[in-house]
Amino acid sequence: LSSFVAGSAWVRGLLGWAWPHRWLTPGSLFPLSCIHTSTALQKLGKWEKKNWIVYPPQLPGEPRRPAEIYHCRREIKYSKDKMWYLAKLIKGMSIDQALAQLEFNDKKGAKVIKEVLLEAQEIAVRNHNVEFKSNLHIAESLTGRGRYVKRIRYHGKGMFGIMKISRCHYFVKLVEGPPPPPEPPRTGFDQAKEYVQHLRSRTLVNTL
Amino acid sequence: MAVLVLLDSPLPRLCSLLQRYWGRLKCGLLPGFSGGPSPPWGPALAVQAPALLPQPGNYTSEDTEVPSLLDSILWMAAPKKRRTIEVNRCRRRNPNKLIKVKRNIDVCPECGNLKQKHVLCGYCYAKIKAEMQLIRKEIGKKEEGPFNAPTVETVVLYNGEKSTEKDEGKRIIERARKRPSWFVRN
């Protein structure tokens, strides 16, 4: 009951700020009737707002622009460095392959990322007009640092250490279509060619 | 008698004097050298070491002395310079530290979930485990207490199944559901 009263007071506050006049409205995603939305309560990050961009309609001759879905999860109780290894694993894979790899990985972050990917797939099919849920690939997958909290760790003989409890964010961008072919690794020959090219492109300055 | 004594006494004094001069000559000192008490001779070390050389008198005491913490600090391993972020990145992102892509994932032919090639399908295993738990509960209800396991075989019968001649003398457990496809009746 008390939470409902608080919610209604908060909604009145929102109306007082002239909610429809915001320059970047999410369209029909946040109707005024629903009060208990978690995204509207916290401050929206840049990654969440990337889903709101609307492109102008495409001309008849243009190739179809593939759908892009941005999804993230904030304040995961895990280290950002350890999460980075999982993010690096699934970069550039198709979503099915990524889910398969994460299912048989023993790390704590694998379970979290799998949930995030399934949520993103669901959102893609529901809101972003994606026809086949398997026709997605992971274009970007990043980790970020969350809010750290300092705590005391008790040692023997009255000594103590200050430990930091770390949290991380995980961001993923799904793009419709098959995954791009992996680029061949840069060999020494390529590096040598580039070096020679750089030498040849030098010009003489302040001369005739 | 008195003449003999007088003759004997200078001899040992002369002998000792001769021995001293012989010793000094052996060291390389000339009789004319007036060095007095010379410093202890040892092979001159070309290596920089703590200036204290163990004296012949002090040698035994230093053996039993335990090296204190202040001494051992000089020889403990410690990083010389801060590892730069570039060096740290090279170590953390080395391919041997990255997670390897698993190539032994297949699809289970029974349920369609993913499974590793050398491991049982997790979904199917969980399904069988749940059913076995219920059968064990039924067995527990029949036995009514611990240490009552009979010495005969057990047969599980599902809905609409009757015991045959082969099941004579065996303990029968009833389960009120349709027989699952994976539990084949012998």
Image (spheres, coloured by chain):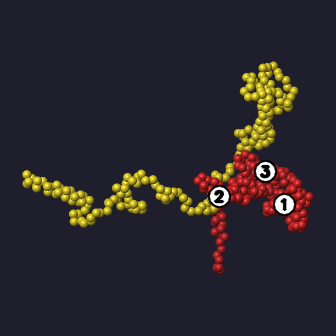
Which numbered disc covers residue A40?
Answer: 1
Residue A63: quadrant of the picture: bottom right
Where residue A164 sits, quadrant-wise, is bottom right
Q: How far apart are marks 1 and 3 (CA)?
A: 21 Å
Chain identity of mark 2: A
Query: Relative to A93, does residue A201 appear above or below in the rendering?
Result: below
* Mark linked to residue A162: 2
The dot on residue B1 is none
Q: Can residue A41 be seen in this view?
A: yes
Report whether B135 appears left or right of A27: left
Residue A60 at what x, y percent from top left?
89, 62
Label 3 residue SS: helix
Residue under pointer 3 = A115
Instruction: Please tell me in which quadrant of the rendered image residue B162 appears.
Output: top right
Chain displayed in yellow: B
Q: Residue at coordinates 47% horizontally, 56% vertically from top-left? A: B68
Please state the horizontal and vertical placement of residue A132, each as a whole percent of the image: 84, 51
Pinpoint residue A71: horizontal percent, then vertical percent.
80, 57
Rendered location of residue A6, percent (x, y): 87, 59
Q: Which of marks 3 and 2 is nearer the N terminus?
A: 3
- Picture quarter with the C terminus of chain B: top right
| Amino acid type, mark 2 | Ile
Q: Distance between the residues labelled 3 and 2?
A: 32 Å
| Residue at position x 88%, y 64% in the image | A13
Pick the residue in front: A34 or A88.
A34
Q: Which of marks 1 and 3 is nearer the N terminus?
A: 1
**What's the distance in space between the residues labelled 1 and 2, CA to CA?**
35 Å
Which chain is indicated by disc 3? A
